[in-house]
Every structure is written in C-alpha cells, then in structure tokens.
Image: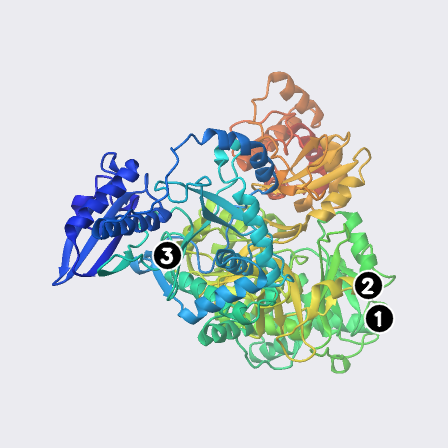
Amino acid sequence: MPDELLDEDGAEHYLSFSVLFHGDLDTAALDRARGAVLRRHPVLTRGRLFRSVLQPAGPRAHRLLVVASRRVFDERSVDVFVSDLAASYRAQVLRVDPGLPELPPAGSEEPRITAALPLARRYWADHPVDGELRLPGPSGAVRGARDGGPLEVRTAGRLRDALHDVAERIGVTPFVLLVASVHAVLFRYGNTAPATALDFDTRAPGEHARIGALVTELPFSSAPRGGTAFAEFARQVGAGLRALHRVRDVPPARVGEEPGPAPVRLAYRRWASAPRFPGVVATVDRGPRAVPVRHALDIAVLDGPDGIEATFRHPPASLTGDGVRGIARHWLSVLSHVTTAPDTVLAGLPLPGPEEEENRLLAARHGTAAGRPRVTVPELFAEQVARRPDAVAVVHEDRRLTYAELDAAATRVAGRLRGKGVGPGDLVALRAGRTELLPAGLLGVLKAGAAYLPLDPEYPAERLEFIVADSRAACELGDADLAAAVEDPAPFGPTTAPPTAPSAFMTPSAFPSPSPSPSVLPSASPDDLAYVIYTSGSTGRPKGVRIEHGSLVSLLLSMRDLLDSRPGDRWLAAASAAFDMSVPEFFLPLVTGGTVVMADGTRTRDGAALRELVDRAQVTHMQATPTGWAMLLDAGFTGPGITAVTGGEALPLALARRLRPRVGRLVNLYGPTEATVWSTADEIGPDPERVTIGRPLANTRAYVLDGRLSPVPVGGSGDLYLAGAGLARGYLGRPELDRERFLPDPFGPPGSRMYRTGDRARRLDDGRLDFLGRTDGQVKLRGYRIELGEIESRLLAVPGVVQAAAAVRGDRLVGYVVGGADPGDLRRALAASLPAYMVPQAFVALGSLPVTAHGKLDRQALPSPPEPAPAAGADGADQADGAAGAGGAGRGEDVVESVRRIWCEVLQVPEVGDTEDLFDLGGHSVTVARISARILDRLGVEVPLHAFFDAPTVQGLATVVAGLRTRP
C-alpha cells in the first residue's frame, strides 16, 4: 500500500481494495465517474479519509487502488463503491443515466436508539456473555513471528456450494451456518457458553446503498448441548442472531451494564462478482484485513464464488501457531462433515483432523506400558533383606533398625496377628507415633496377609471412632503393641507373652494366642488389599479407599524408575500415615535398598527443625506439598543434591522457579488416592516457563473426555479420567459410590475400569496434561484433600445454624453460616469432629446464602472474610491477668511470655495481645502445628490439638501449658 495514501494513523485503521481493468480503459471517463461517486457520498471528501490512485499495470491494464479510513468506510461500502463506480462509468461511456436510486438524507440515529432501548435492556439482561475461553495449545507468551502471524485457509468451491445447499435445507443462511460451526468447535473445546463478536450492519431501511462506517460489533453467545443435532443447533443460532439483530441499533453502553466482551471475533463477508464496466474486463481484489487483533482469536471468513477463504489471527500471547492450525483443521472438519450429516449431535462432530493428530492422542491416552512382576510389597522387601541385611532400613533420631532387625520385628508383629486369627481380607487399624516402630507395624500387617488402616493420633477422637467402626477393623495396634512386638526378643512359639498395654480400640487381648513360626505365615497375593485410607466425604461421611498390593507395587516400581531410587538413598518420611503421600515414603526406600528417615510430628511442623533434620540425616529424596516446600524455603533450605518431589496441590510457577535452583531435581506429581497416590509426573527443568501435571506413569492411562465420554481433541478441556494398574478396588462398603466414580473403560481391555477424578484438564501438543481445576466441591489446601460438603454438614449440626457453606478464599478456608452462632462455638464444634486442616480459619455470618439463577449455591459469590486484624500490643492489665491465669507469679509470667514470643515468631508480627484470637490473626492448621512444635521444643509439653480451638488466645493457651507442666 503506497505510503502517500496513508496518514499518521497507519494501515491498521484503513480498508484497502483495488480494481484491475484489462482492455482499453477510458481513464478520463473513469476520473469523471470517481467524481460522481464522491459527490453522491460526500462523507468521503472530508479530510484525508479517502484516497485513490490509478496506476498502469501493464500494456493494456490499469489498477485503481483505493484506501479509505474505517471511520467512513466499512466492508459493505466496498461493494457499494464499486457498484456505484461501475454505474457512473457506464453512464459516462454510454452517455446514459446511471440509474442510481436516491439516497435519503442521513438522519440522526437517536430516534431509532430510543425506540429500541427497552427491548435492548431486556435482551442483554437475558443474554450475559461469558468472557472466559478455552482454546487448544498452551497459554502464555509464545516466541517466534511464525506463531503470531496470520494463518490463511481455503476451501474448494464444491465445499462452499455444499454448505450453501445444506444451509438452505436446514432453513438457515450460510452466515448462520458458519457461526454455528465456530460455536460448535468452541463447545467441543469445553466452552459451555461460547461467545463471538460479530459485525452487524446498522443501515436503516432504504439506506443499503449508503457508504459509511455503518457497522457495530456485538457479542453473541449460544447455549449448545452435546446431544443436540447440529442442524437443530444451527436453527437455534439463527433464532438467536435474529433476536440480536433487533437490538443492533442500541450501543451496549447505552443499556447500562454492558455485556462482557466476546473472546473470539468472527467477521463474515460475501464476495460477489465484479460489476460490468463497458469495454473492459474488471476484477476486484480486496486487501487483507489490517485491523488490530483485539481478541484471543480473530477469524475473517470470505464467502466467494470460488470457495470459502478464512484468515485466522491471534496475539502471540494467546495461542501457539500449532494451536491455531489445530483450530483451523477442526473447523474445516466440522464444515465438511455437516454437508453430508447435518443431524450429527454436537458431541459427535469429528475434530481430530489429520491422522497423525489422532495417533498422537491415542498414544498419549494410554501412557507407557511396562512389565511388572506379580509380587507383593513383603516379597520385594524380603529381596532387600536377603541382599543387605546389615544396611540401615529405618532411622529415627538416634535409633535405627537394620533390614534384618526390621524384618524380624515385622515378622513378630505378623506372627502375633496371625495368632489372633488375622489374615487376608482383614483390616488392622494402626494408630502409632512417627518412630521407627511405625514401618515395622505397617510391614507386619502386610506380612500377616492383612491390610493396614492408618489412623492419625492427632485426629479428633470422634473421627477416629467413626473410622474404626465404619471399617470394621479386626483389631487396632498402638505404640505399646508395636513396642512389645518389636522389642521382645523371644522366639516365636507358645511362650510369647502378650502386650501389657493394649490400645483403646483394640479388641480384647490382641496378642493372647500362641504365634506360629515364620515359615507358616501366609503371604498375601497381588490381588489382596494392602491398605485402606479414609478421605474426606462430600456428604459429611469420610470414605475408605481400598488399594491392592498389585496397584501399590506398580506405583513403587514406576517411582523407582522415575526417580532413580536405589540402595543407599535416604528418603525423608514426613507425611502423616493417614495421608497417602506417606505410602511411597515408607515403602519405596524399603523395596529399593534405601533408608527411611522418620521425621516426627514436631519436626514436620517447623521449617527450621525440618531443614536441620534433612541436613543432618543427609536426605537424598523427599516429598512435600508446595506449602511444605515454601515453609522449608522460608527457613533457608537448600539441597543441591536432593531429588525433590512435590504434589498434593497445584505447584505455582513462582514457587517452582524459587525451588528449582535449590535442589538437584524437581518432579511435580499428580494423583488421587483412588489411583494409588500418584498417576502423572512432570520433570521441572532448570528454567521453567510452565508447570503441568505431566504424562501418565507407567501402566497408567489418562483420558480427557467430554460429557459423552468421547476424547477431547488436543488442546481442548474436558474431564480427567484415570485407568490402569494403579486403580483402587473401590470404596469400602460404598457400592453406590463405586458405581458413580469407577466406570467401565471404553478404551481399555475388556472388563477394565476408569476413575472419574472430578478434575478438569487439557492435553497439550507435547502430550503433557494441564490441570484446570475441579468440577465439584472438593478442594486441595496445603496438600490436604477437603470435601467442602463434609464441612458444611458439620456446620449444619451446630445449634443455631440454619444454612451453611464453605469455600477457599486465598489461602484461607472460610465457613459461612446463616443463623445465630458464635465463631468460637463453631470452631470448637468442628474441631471435635474434623481434622485441624478442615476447620475453617474464619467464619462469616450472612443473612442468606447467594444462589444462582437455578437456585443452587453460588459458591463464587460468597464474600471474602475481613483480612486478619493486625496484632495489637498487650497492655499492662492484660499481662497481669495472663500471668495469674497461667498459674502464679514468676513461672506463670514466663509461660505467658514464652507463648507470646512463639506466636509472634510464627505469625510474623511484632506483638500479640493476651486476649487476641489466634484465628482472627490469620492462624490455620499449619500455624497451629508450628506453634505446637515450638511449645514442645521450648517448654517441654505437647499441647493437645483441641486446646487451640478451646482457648485460642495467648492467655488461654498459656494456662493450658502451665497446667500440663505441673502434671507429675
């Protein structure tokens, strides 16, 4: 485009086209014709809004290049200008009347806007626009001009003719059919209410031959459903466009609250043949659309006699070039399919495009197959015992057990369980502290052929009682039971003495019977249960997940290969045994010849203490949630030789960039309890640009499916399903829940199942999975899996609460109640039945809960609680009262000040008043754990968890501490 035809605004604000004449052109007549057109449309003569130049293009050819400002010219104006120019040229050459209709004087748009305003207000109130968009390919900045440039595609003329024919058959226009096709593709990408920005002509009746910028861009949204036939959907789109057309004269800004912007722009124009110029052959060449790309994706469609041309453009930050090419392929695939099968339901429209994309999807779907022996964990452990009996298997503080000692201790536990009649098919509840005895107990249960049920001693008694009763555990073992079995050197036989201190829930005399010799101990099979772990339940009832030995072995061997776990490695065991992250911490080192380094509960809560243990024990491998890694980093952690594993919650990119330089390797894992801890893995490189949940582990299959359980194309979002060797047997005593979450696998071997995770994901071009969030009320907070429904059911059980809800706001768990209830009473009631991590840190009283248009809880509309109040200085009266309440002069004052200093350190505030509430200051389960750990370290007492909820102030907690210190 010649620069002299542009002003300082540049090409992007102009529309250009040219008319090429072949033959003997009467240039003088053409000049007079141009003048006639300008007089007919005086808007073109105002300033530098319109320029044209006639250039020689060959011996008998001329080109008329036209550049017009978009302030006075739109796409339709091109047709009007060329048509008027041809009529005026014909009149000049043939000396006839041009026959152009009279144009009415341009009037004010205000009367039309005023008349349509009430209808427009109703329309936009009923048609909100969802500005969110899911498209193929990774988001984020993309390098390379190739990715940001336009992509042009062209269809054959026969496809264009077929589309026009099918549009006529189903009763819509070609434009409507094209809009419907784009919305259908967007729907398959996971957009439940796809929206596109469309151009609408605002010319009044009788003004169709007027030149001007008489077009408005309006957002149009549809409501596709997977089971709707495309033909019916196209008719629905047509009805929706007619409704929008009736309010096109009213700018959305005049309505009041504007609808949200549409993320995709779709421009459509019909390209008619050039009108006849006497004595010459003329063709019209429309220049490329040179407008700024203001949407995530801009599609310009030109419907011409020789076919359909489409130009796809996008900002470099929104899509990759491969992503755009994939969209174009999918769109052309849909267009081609509906010409012959317009009644195909939307969920069944073919999107894969070329064969290689389908092959890549199939390959990624099935993950990597690997041969695995049909063995159990005790058998793998026995191999290591035979190879390295004197190597250290478990270490806790200054105590350690070699492989031979651990094997002997576990065998004694197993023998005593078998003497009681416990074996395959039984559950043994295990409630023990985090010492070297715990791995011995776990292995002992497995050696007996039974499955273990881990109980966290810090959980509320009510919850533990429910789990034991619900699981129908054959017996329960505690620290005293394990100590008696581990430390008793007596040989197996009838002289073995029973333990002296049975656990609270143990069936009477757990070990009274003679123990058989090790040679007759039955071993479990790979199909037997290895453990049952209880997780939060959406109905308020925790549910037990049953994991078999075969699934556990598959996980351990996959992690062995992934993390290069080998003899001599030292694994930190920091997770609660009731948290399934503990499973590989206990067993992976023991089946690969490594050492389990036990971290007791106090160390896991304090970053500095945990860092010291990692350094002193020379840990080589460790797992932690992102929250745990952040705690360690804040404490100055660095471990250049450590293989760091993170999982349990989403890993923020900022944290990955902070952690990666401090460790030797960083691996991000994803997986639900129902798929045996971990299912996918992503190695995080030295300079990460993106964090994903990676690819399936060996013998694991991951599917991204739509509502009809059909695979979603690469880049599209859908529901994540898992299948393969890691799948749980199901839930304990919950067949209805099994049917809901464990479905037949249509892509696996006959009889196989897949697990519906409740997570949303999309598969990237390289096969990795991108985690997109939950589809239900489950959340992950500090690595813990929390069903909000369980919290809500507990809140409803509190007297005075008539409605309840829960949500995560920032990094805080918040409870919402309707009805009179004191926050302290709510906190204490929930702490009596829920683990600390499930007790909300803040409570908000509401007059009513917000609901959606369908009457359901609108969780997103729940307000954020007030920010935690800044800690205030304590006045003299508070200090005096606190000292007295803590148990007397001198010693009481020391306790108060010690507790106060600990609170200030953990909360990172300069001062805390005696009566300020810990949870009002932003305290949560991790905060409670850190304060408890430091009180134990400095004051020598272990504060029970309930005390923090019963007396959540410095004064109240100091009273508890002082009382514990005076006990004999």
Q: Quadrant of residue 863?
A: top right
Q: Quadrant of residue 535?
A: bottom right
Circles 2 and 1 in contact, beta carbons < 8 Å: yes
Q: Which comes sooner in the sequence, label 2 or label 3?
A: 2
Q: Which comes sooner in the sequence, label 3 or label 1?
A: 1
Kindly identify the residue that appears in the image at 54 percent across and 70 percent down: 697
Residue 943 visible in the shown view: no
Using residue 331 as the reference point, say whether residue 8 is left or right of it.
left
Mark pair 2, 3: CA separation: 51 Å
Mark pair 2, 1: CA separation: 9 Å
Which residue is most to the right? 508
Name the residue that disc number 3 marks.
687
Disc 2 marks which amino acid? Cys
- Circle number at residue 432: none
Kindly identify the residue that appears in the image at 42 percent across and 48 percent down: 295
Q: Quadrant of the C terminus?
A: top right
Which secondary structure lies at badge 1? loop
Name the residue that disc number 2 marks.
475
Circles 2 and 3 in contact, beta carbons < 8 Å: no
Which secondary structure lies at badge 2? strand
Characterize the local packing of mark 3: few (<14), some (14-19) or many (20 or more) Cα atoms within 10 angstroms.
few
Disc 1 marks which amino acid? Lys
Name the residue that disc number 1 marks.
420
User: In the image, is residue 220 above or below residue 23?
Assistant: above
Which secondary structure lies at badge 3? loop
User: In the image, is residue 883 above or below residue 778?
Assistant: above
Characterize the local packing of mark 2: few (<14), some (14-19) or many (20 or more) Cα atoms within 10 angstroms.
many
